[in-house]
Amino acid sequence: MRLLDEALSVFRRLRTLPELPACNAILDGLVKARRFGCAWELFDEMHSRGMVPSVVTYNTLINACRHQGAVAKAQEVWDQMVARRIDPNVVTYTTMICALCEEGCIGDAEQRFDAMKESGMQPNLYTYNVLMSSHCQRHDVNRAFALYQELLKSGLVPNAVIFTTLIDGFCKVKRFSEAKEMFLGMPRFGVAPTVPVYNSLMDGAFKSGNAREALAVYQEMTHLGLCPDEFTCSIVVRGLCDGGQIEVAARFLEGVRQSGANLNAAAYNALIDEYCKNGNLEEALATCTRMTEVGIEPNVVSYSSLIDGHSEVGNMQIAMAIYTEMVAKGIEPNVVTYTALIHGHAKNGGIDAAFRLHKEMLEKGISPNAITVSVLVDGLCRENRVQDAVRFVMEYSGMKYNDLHSFFSNSTTEEDHLIPNGVIYMTLIYGLYIDSQHYEAGKLFSYMRKSGMVPDSFTYTLLIRGQCMLGYVLNAMMLYADMMKIGVKPMRHKIVCPEIW
């Protein structure tokens, strides 16, 4: 950084400009250092002194726009380059495609990719990988694989990065057999598997419910002499925990620790979280202690899991003590932390304390999510404050109504009917049901269905029982038919209606 500052200082003191390559080098250094303001100032100075930019100059500027998230400005730079009769090269196209992908403009990126090929320019592996990775992130692995086949036909030889992208893409959509097929095909191209490839394959095996296969992949990797990285360990621990093999996960983590391999907080957090979910809070705290003993400090995820675990069993005093310790250490709580505390207070009769925490998180600029709102609504309903719950939801949703009667009577547009999340809908429907407001619950349910949200089996069951209790058997049968049509499995032992079950 100091050398870059010195170079920039010398440049500005020169009466005559250095050669263009030297200017481009300084410009590139500024962009890589994310000093975009200085980069644009330098370009303006180059322009004012009559220097004619090259394609390298424009590539650097488009890359700056990419890092700034300014796709429109990148297009302006592109147009300026073309107006100067400077032809874009592979780097120009690839950088622009990357900028479009990063901003979610995948259709525009594909069009630019097509234009690149139509101009007679051959995309390189990096160009293909940018598009493939973007499609995989959107779970469109079929398009990513089509691009892979295209690059093979063009004569390009895939490298480890290409294989990692595709294998990870297949694994994320639980198409493990295809990921394994890609993996087995790597030697044909002279590509040796890397740790990231093995990590993706292990993650895919775990997500497909095949823990044995995942552990076999791990053993193969270590047998080849590849050292597991910090991501490897967290993938294995999380995968074993998700499969209910918490003790196996604990032994694995201890074995990795003793071997001296790299570990990070994520591996310990996975174990802490699973112990908390199982109600084994003593072991969760012990794991947190072991974590600090190996020099890894607990982070917001660690603390949030411990807070959630104690809140879940009603130990609010301990949960708040953990929260206080966390803040004292300078670790900022996030929406997960606050939601755990709010949930604990709300379900244990402390709705006022829950709303104080809600106010605190808003004051800190942390926006509540749908789960936060749902637990507050649930807490109000538990204390028979259903109307307060309704008003809170209306306020959260930005509606102008403060009760359901006004909402049902006066709302006219489709937007008026929309509560922004299905979880909030279902929580409020449950509150209305336990308050014996079956008509209102049914009405709100119909708005939920119109909005395209899919209720769960529990919500359907409540409404069916409510309609049966009111004697509206036809309505109950229609609800049951709707549930079966969209593939929601009925809770038959909970449906008390002879005409249905």
Image: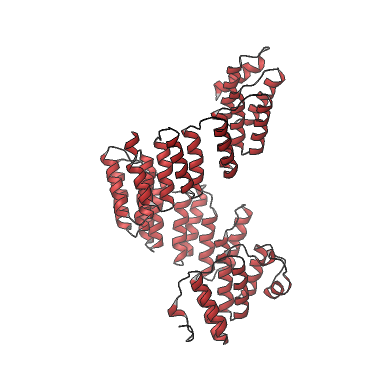
Give the residue displayed 52% in from the left and 51% down from the top: 327
Name the residue nearer the viewer: 43 or 230. Answer: 43
Q: Quadrant of the C terminus?
A: bottom left
- Across and down, in percent, residue 335 comes to 55, 55
Q: Quadrant of residue 418?
A: bottom right
- Across and down, in percent, residue 74 comes to 64, 34
Give the residue displayed 46% in from the left and 52% down from the top: 301
Query: Please, is residue 199 above or below residue 119 in the view?
Result: below
Q: Quadrant of residue 279?
A: bottom left
Query: Please, is residue 260 above or below residue 453 in the view?
Result: above
Q: Quadrant of the N terminus?
A: top right
Q: Is residue 383 left or right of residue 199?
A: right
Q: Please, which colouring scheme is shown?
A: secondary structure
- Across and down, in percent, residue 230 comes to 38, 43
- Across and down, in percent, residue 374 comes to 56, 65
Give the residue displayed 30% in from the left and 51% down from the top: 213
Name the residue nearer the viewer: 401 or 160. Answer: 160
The answer to whether residue 487 shows anywhere in this view is yes
Q: How many marks?
A: 0
Name the residue nearer the viewer: 134 or 367. Answer: 134
Q: Residue furthest top?
A: 16
The answer to whether residue 297 shows anywhere in this view is no
